[in-house]
Amino acid sequence: MSAISIKIMHNKTKQTADANAVATSPVSTQTKATNAAPLLQLQNVCKSYGEGKDRNSILKNINLDIQAGEFIAIVGFSGSGKTTLISAIAGLIGVDSGALLKQGQPITGPGPDRGVVFQNYSLMPWLTVYENVALAVDEIFKDWPAAQRRAHTEKYVRMVNLGAAMDKKPAELSGGMRQRVNVARALAANPDILLLDEPLSALDALTRGNLQDEILQIWEQDKKTVVLITNDVDEAIYMADRVIPLNPGPDATFGPDFKVTIPRPRDRTALNHNEEFKRLRAEITKYLMDIGIAKNLDVGADKIVLPNVRPNTSHDWQQAAPALKPNQADLGRPRYLEFSQISKIYPTPDGNSTVKVVDGFDLKMKKGEFISIIGHSGCGKSTVLSMTAGLNSISEGGIILDNREIDGAGPDRGVVFQAPSLFPWLTAFENVMLGVDKVYPHASKSERQDIVEYYLTRVGLGDALRKKAGDMSNGMRQRVGIARAFALSPKLLLLDEPFGMLDSLTRWELQEVLMEVWERTQVTAIVVTHDVDEAILLADRVVMMTNGPHAKIGKIQEIDLPRPRTRKALLAHDDYYHYRESILSFLTECDHTH
């Protein structure tokens, strides 16, 4: 897990922010509902890269006023220019036109009055936690006595709850702990403004929530002004006074302000019952989806007809029947997939004993059912999936799929991993065709080509069939992985955190793609996820696992929501927040018993 980065700026021009100057959240980014002079102002800021025909406009006419002590969340997605924006405020890059002012003075370069936490930056691996933070303190406060610098460094290490790990090196720390070091290093510079560029995006949900609370405690205690870049709408509403969308580039601009009036301190569980939270969540999500999600994802797909051919993984593949078109009479067949008290045992590192990671996982699935498995990191959910795929041996118990016991990997199970294994030198079409050739050897070449083109078009890649995987974005590569899994016409579709590496907007879009294709195929499916909303959106049942070791099924939540589903419709459904609270409560209880 990569640590977030810190840039500690020099040429300090520190001025203490008055805690009482926190302004009421404004109605727009241009107009302030206060007489106090803004601490930070962006006026018609524009930034582009390249020259001539290669010129690419990133930011256009960015306007923003931020009061001292205010907490602003800017919701930005891949390619929206969010890192460019943060770098400009930090003084790390110049802008083409417009003005960036702090306390009325132009920002002409970096300084320790602006502490920056970037998403990807490594600590000095040969230095301890204390020494990594002391690097900044010793540079900025050279005139202080050594004892004062040491006390200052220790204060901020303890502030992020790393006092017991002060003498440890980064290699001995978890990803969340390394990120705490980065936050401590930024805060130790005593900045007026803390700039956070997706600092928590690489963390699991539990660690992310804990660090959100720590950042909020520090913000309340030190009354820093905070600008947070995030792609998580819940995180933005939970933490900020205002949520401002950064519309995707080129020519990225700010959308409307969403003012958060929910009283502080905010409780995650209580938010589930808060009507203002629900309203904000629905409005921001709708806005982001409307501006960002590609329309007409399946344009042209209806012109391609699937040939009447079955894969060689089917019992009756020689009988003419449309590929992946379900037999309605067979759907809902009980015990189509059966987990019979399966366990996974590993030897301990010293080899003297064993540990049972998964202990007695027992579940029956109907044909055509969609199951989500959710739980904290290390609960064994991916282990269950890998055993089902035949990629990991079963220590105890057994798995039966369509009346046959699973004893190894096979093309009757399509698997989509977090990072799809594509050949970068092959096109999208060629990557999918590799599998199709294997499971449809009895089909003609044109029939196999139709199958590949059909599913690539269904996932929105009709115009990129001949594009090489190495030239694609993460989101496009994951589309290829989804198309490939469906094109193999598997008996069972297994998805292991398939959207975990993607930003929220791309994740939402691909969830819609997945549901649209699944509705047409009704393939039996299991998704492993740590995202509660994703689990509810996709599944007929959500299977919640207890913490490992000895992880097992702790609770199963039936999801009785109409299909086909969309995220917008889900947020408006009366039962959605009931399901959400049920799952979140279980995960919270597991956290307390860990």
Image: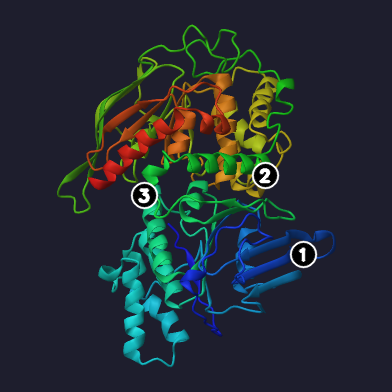
Mark 3: which amino acid?
Answer: Leu
240, above or below 435, in the image: below
Q: Does dot 1 land on a helix, a strand or a loop?
A: loop
Alpha carbon separation for disc pair 1 and 2: 24 Å
List the single residue furthest toward the left. Answer: 352
Alpha carbon separation for disc pair 3 and 1: 41 Å
Mark 1: which amino acid?
Answer: Gly
Alpha carbon separation for disc pair 2 and 3: 37 Å
351, above or below 553, in the image: below
Residue on which disc 1 sits: 50
Mark 2: which amino acid?
Answer: Lys
Query: Residue 258: percent from the left, percent from the top?
Result: 59, 50
Residue at 32% in and 45% down:
378
Q: Nearer the viewer, residue 324 or 328?
A: 328
Q: Please state if 43 lies on the left or on the right of 262 as rendered.
A: right
Residue 30's tag is none
Q: Does dot 3 land on a helix, a strand or a loop?
A: helix
Label 3 environment density (alpha carbons within 10 Å; few <14, some 14–19, many ≥20): some
Residue on which disc 3 sits: 206
Residue 468's tag is 2
Query: Residue 289: percent from the left, percent from the top?
Result: 63, 40
Choose mark 2 or mark 3, whichever is in front.
3
Asked whether the viewer can see residue 422, the reply is no
Query: Residue 119: percent from the left, percent from the top?
Result: 51, 61
Q: In the rendered structure, which disc, 3 or 1, sits on the residue that comes first in sequence?
A: 1
What colour scheme governs how the chains and residues are painted in the rendered image of this protein?
rainbow
Q: Does dot 2 land on a helix, a strand or a loop?
A: loop
